[in-house]
Structures are given as C-alpha cells and as structure tokens.
Image (cartoon, rainbow, N blue to C red):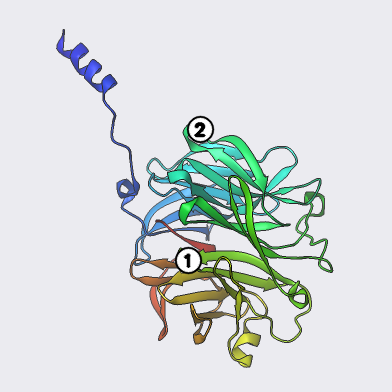
C-alpha cells in the first residue's frame, strides 16, 4: 500500500479526539453583553472574569446553555422569541439554527441532559398557554425529537438535577406573541416549581394562595436543594419573599431579609446562585445582592447599581452588572475584578 493511501486508511479508521472546553482556554463562565456600538456578543470568561473569547450574536439574547463537555453554547432569544443559535465556541461560528415548532415560542432558557446528548428548552404552547419542555437531539444535528408538559404556565428557567431530573420554574404568567410581552392573567396566575423527567411531571410545588403573584423565574441547586428566585407581579404590598428553598418531598422554605433590605429589593430577584452553604440573589431594580444560608437565614447584603448576573465559580461567587462590572462576592461584600466597556446582560452562566 502506498504511504498516502496507508495514512488515509489509518485516519478513516481512527476516532479523532473530541474538542472540549480546554480548547478555548477552559472558561469558567459564559455571559452575553451589549457593546458600545450597539451590537451583541457572547463572551467566555475566566474564573477571575477576564475575556477568553468573544463571539458575535445576531440580536439580544436572554441566557445561554453551556454543553457539559463540548465547547458549544446555545443562546436563546428573549420571550416571545422563536430562535436559538448553537455556537461553536472554538471556531466562533453558528453551528446550528433552532426554530421553535409552529405554535411554540421559547422562554429564553435551556439545559442539557443525557451527558449532553439532549437539549431541553422551555416553551409556550401558544394556542393553550400551557408550558412545554422541548427536546432536541444534539447527536442528530439538534433535530427536534419531542416534548412534554412543563407542569404549569410560563416555564422560564430549567436546570438539570442528578439523575437527569429537570427542575422547571413555571412562572405562572400567561402571554401571547400577538400581545408582545404583556401579561394576560395576573389575577389568576399560579406559579409552581416542577420536577420532570422525559416520562413527564414527577412533582410540583406551589406557593400559598396569597403569594400567587410571586412568579418563580430562576433556579440554582447544589444537587439536593433547589433555590428559586421570584419576581412579584403588580403592586407590591408588604415585602414579598423573593427566594425559596426546596428539597423534594418537603415543603418549601421562603426566606426574607430584614424589612428595610427586603423593601430595597423592590419585589424583584433577577438571578440566583448556590455556592457551598450560601445562596445569592440579585436585584437590578434594587441595586442589591442578598446572601442567605441554605437554612434560609439572611446573612448579608451588598449594594451595586444594576447588578443581575450571579454564578458560583472555581474561586467563589461572581456577579456582573449592566455597567460592565465583574465582581467577586462574599459575606464581606463585593470586590471589583474588572470593568469592561460593555453592558452585561441578565445572566452569568457557569460552565460545568
């Protein structure tokens, strides 16, 4: 056999190594931002918040789902958007375009299960208003392969728990694309936290009737306790709880800071993260970060204008704000890591 043919046969019969996050510098976080020229991009950040890569986005997104091993990220349109893009973070290109099926739109979040083989997306069944979880096969070019009920109305964030269980934040808010972002059922909304698998809904956790305006929006977990961040809808009465903690099979714990701090959050928790025995929630409206223990006790508060993104990283909790700031966060306060010439969007995503 000629040398050229021998080498060709060898390559054809070998399994080439798969690329991983190390091939783009082992980023700790993903974060989307609006740049000074009005364009949008997705950034990979180090554990200290420095840029590793920048990839242009076609429009403003909401959040991204990071593949657990491959250097891929799925960036989602804001509600009621119907598109998502799969980004090759090595080549800096869009590898796949995802379009919500007819009669569906995305809610801006997703998660991978089955070792990254299956992407799960939160969606709205426009005709009925019921929440759905869509399934997309990565091994088949992100082809749509099914869906199940989310267990409620307005599923927002979805996260993976051990055993490929999905926790779903059903915000309870009915919307319709023809009405833009208008909320159509505030008088009757019923948020819940649902646990689902590919077989369907396994468990739902609802709030008391007098808290039915407390929309469950964002989630984080240490694998056992699920922390859920809430946003009060409508006129704010007495300070509403904005953080809940739940273990399956038990009642949720609703937490609160002291009166002045709770009022300062302005009824809005924008993001949530769990690090060890600490839970952090942010409020861009209130310019606050609140820290709680997993037992529900309030620990500390920090102030920063327009702070929203928060995630647990290798060096501890990290937060971002709409003024370009990246901050280390602990019970002692917020320590600046850097100031970028961009406006960070709402979410900071930890790469597993």
Local SS, label 2: loop
Which residue in the rendered view is the most extreme toward the top? 1
Inter-mark Cα distance, 1 to 2: 32 Å
Q: Residues within 10 Å of mark 2 (few under 14, many from 20)?
A: few
Q: Nearer the viewer, residue 34 or 159?
A: 159
Residue at horizontal 55 percent and vertical 75 percent from the top: 282
Q: Residue at x 72, y 44 (%)?
A: 104
Mark 1 lies on residue: 224
Question: Percent x, y for residue 109?
Answer: 58, 54
Instruction: Name above or below for residue 224 compared with residue 58.
Output: below
Name the residue that disc number 2 marks.
141
Which of the marked residues, 1 or 2, is nearer the chain's N terminus? 2
Between 128 and 49, which is closer to the camera in this rendering? 128
Compared with residue 318, is residue 165 higher up or lower down, i.e. above or below? above
**Can you say which quadrant of the picture contains the C terminus?**
bottom left
Occupied quadrant, residue 11? top left
The image shows residue 136 at horizontal and vertical percentages of 56, 39
């Amino acid at each position: 056999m000629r040398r050229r043919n021998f080498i060709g046969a060898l390559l054809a019969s070998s399994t080439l190594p798969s690329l991983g996050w190390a091939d783009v510098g082992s980023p700790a976080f993903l974060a989307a931002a609006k740049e000074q020229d009005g364009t949008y991009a997705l950034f990979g950040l180090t554990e200290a918040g420095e840029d590793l890569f920048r990839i242009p986005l076609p429009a403003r997104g909401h959040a991204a789902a990071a593949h657990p091993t491959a250097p891929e990220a799925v960036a989602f349109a804001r509600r009621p958007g119907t598109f998502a893009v799969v980004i090759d973070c090595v080549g800096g290109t869009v590898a796949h375009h995802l379009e919500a099926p007819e009669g569906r739109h995305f809610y801006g979040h997703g998660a991978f299960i089955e070792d990254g083989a299956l992407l799960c997306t939160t969606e709205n069944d426009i005709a009925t208003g019921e929440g759905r979880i869509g399934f997309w096969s990565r091994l088949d070019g992100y082809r749509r392969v099914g869906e199940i009920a989310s267990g409620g109305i307005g599923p927002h964030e979805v996260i993976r728990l051990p055993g490929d269980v999905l926790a779903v934040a059903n915000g309870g808010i009915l919307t319709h694309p023809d009405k833009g972002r208008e909320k159509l059922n505030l008088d009757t909304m019923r948020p819940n936290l649902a646990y689902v698998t590919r077989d369907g809904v396994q468990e739902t956790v609802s709030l008391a009737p007098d808290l039915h305006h407390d929309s469950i929006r964002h989630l984080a977990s240490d694998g056992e306790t699920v922390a859920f961040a809430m946003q009060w809808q409508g006129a704010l009465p007495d300070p509403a709880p904005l953080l809940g903690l739940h273990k399956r099979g038990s009642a949720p714990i609703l937490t609160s800071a002291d009166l002045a701090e709770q009022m300062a959050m302005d009824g809005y928790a924008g993001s949530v993260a769990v690090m060890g025995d600490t839970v952090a929630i942010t409020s861009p409206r209130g310019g606050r970060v609140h820290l709680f223990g997993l037992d529900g006790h309030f620990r500390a508060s920090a102030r920063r204008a327009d702070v929203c993104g928060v995630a647990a990283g290798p060096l501890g909790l990290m937060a971002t704000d709409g003024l370009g700031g990246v901050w280390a966060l602990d019970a002692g306060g917020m320590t600046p890591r850097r100031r970028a010439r961009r406006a960070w969007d709402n979410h900071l995503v930890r790469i597993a």
